[in-house]
Amino acid sequence: MTTAKTTQDLDVEPTPLALLLLGREADPHSERGVECPGDLPAPSDPDLVARARAARARLGERVFVLGHHYQRDEVIQFADVTGDSFKLARDAAARPEAEYIVFCGVHFMAESADILTSDAQRVVLPDLAAGCSMADMATAEQVAECWDVLTDAGVADRVVPVSYMNSSADIKAFTGEHGGTICTSSNAERALRWAFEQGGPDGKVLFLPDQHLGRNTAVLDMGLSLDDCVVYNPHRPGGGLTAGQLRDAKMILWRGHCSVHGRFSLDSVREVRERIPGVRVLVHPECRHEVVRAADHVGSTEHIIRMLEEAPAGSKWAVGTELNLVRRLANRFAEQDKEIVFLDRTVCFCSTMNRIDLPHLVWALEALADGRTVNRITVDERTAGFARLALDRMLALP
């Protein structure tokens, strides 16, 4: 029998930022820092698991619980399905009989679920503070201003926006309204090839909001050069770019990134190779370009899971993605003698994912069981319509 691995088992060290990374002591001006109304159960309540089970039993098939791969184990145990953000949103849409969709993920994921589900279904986010730093790095106002800059530079008619799934409903709607598509980390190359075709011989792509996924896909998968890429900084006049730079560029990358994957460095890769002879380095494409280049394998969350499932017994892996998932995979494959460690030596949870804990889930489920809908996530009809258009284009990609 195996026991759950601790952070020490994964050879990582807690940092002074541990409480912040776990979603406590949050800056109220970032990450949709919103307090949930009502009284939450105490985290120390020994009856939390029993209360969650009881609330779920009362709700029956009226509730469908989605759990993102990066969620805590204490929450994942109550998920009907687990997966990445788009898979979960589609799973929700495939369960029209469920009156309530409880999304254990972050805000943009719940928005996508609301867009794809019926009007009769209600999407609930157990903690409204569960935002996404990457998604929040591109606001509707900033992107509209960017489009004005592209128009003034005379290139907007050749630019097709491609937005990562990890974006707000507003950004997805902008993308749909301006002839673009959404992508996931699995189909980013297909989305970019489609977008360049739409833009014509001199076509360009505005990639939102993660610069690293856009750069890695364009350079490593499509053969573009780093010189073909420029970074638009929404906090600088004109994005910090000249009209000439915008005219010359093929990829206009938004200055955004994942706070988890952006932590991994070239030193992390070098250190783990020295520490564990024969280790294979497996990273997410949201990592920095130099990290992806130095890794042995790169792929989406689902790809990472599948590669570790298929890995031979006795193999050694250093994984560059969110710690909750790495810890779960290390424990899952321990009996197969697969050594799986976190790529970085310091703890790096997704702080906003970790804001959904068992007390918040219990609170939300008990409220629903009592007939009260809390923390409902809704997207207005116009925004949802254009966002759905962009999502439909993604689903129709060749």
Image: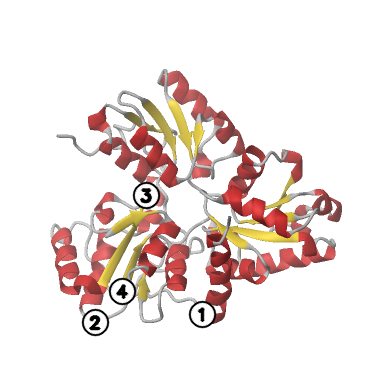
Please identify the residue farthest to the front as the structure is shown.
Answer: 398
**Counting other residues with Cα less than 10 Å from the Cα at mark 1, is it few (<14), some (14-19), or many (20 or more)?**
few
Which is more foreground, mark 1 or mark 3?
Answer: 1
Disc 3 + disc 2, Cβ < 8 Å: no
| Label 4 – label 2 distance at C-alpha | 11 Å
Across and down, in percent, residue 143 comes to 67, 65
| Label 3 – label 2 distance at C-alpha | 34 Å
Disc 4 + disc 2, Cβ < 8 Å: no
| Label 4 – label 3 distance at C-alpha | 31 Å
Residue ID for mark 1: 380
Across and down, in percent, residue 70 comes to 37, 50
Closer to the N terminus: mark 4 or mark 1?
A: 4
Q: Tell me the residue at 54%/66% (across/down).
A: 392
Closer to the N terminus: mark 4 or mark 3?
A: 3
Q: Tell me the residue at 59%/70% (across/down).
A: 173
Across and down, in percent, residue 325 comes to 36, 44
Closer to the N terminus: mark 4 or mark 2?
A: 4
Q: Is residue 255 visible?
A: no
| Label 4 – label 1 distance at C-alpha | 18 Å
**Counting other residues with Cα less than 10 Å from the Cα at mark 2, is it few (<14), some (14-19), or many (20 or more)?**
few
Residue ID for mark 3: 19
Looking at the rendering, in which quadrant would you find the N terminus? top left
Residue closer to the observer: 283 or 236: 283
Which is more foreground, mark 3 or mark 2?
Answer: 2
| Label 1 – label 2 distance at C-alpha | 24 Å
Looking at the rendering, in which quadrant would you find the C terminus? bottom right
Residue closer to the observer: 294 or 394: 394
The amino acid type, in three-letter code, at marker 4 is Tyr
Closer to the N terminus: mark 1 or mark 2?
A: 2
Residue ID for mark 4: 100
Horizontal side of residue 382 vs 232, given as left or right? left
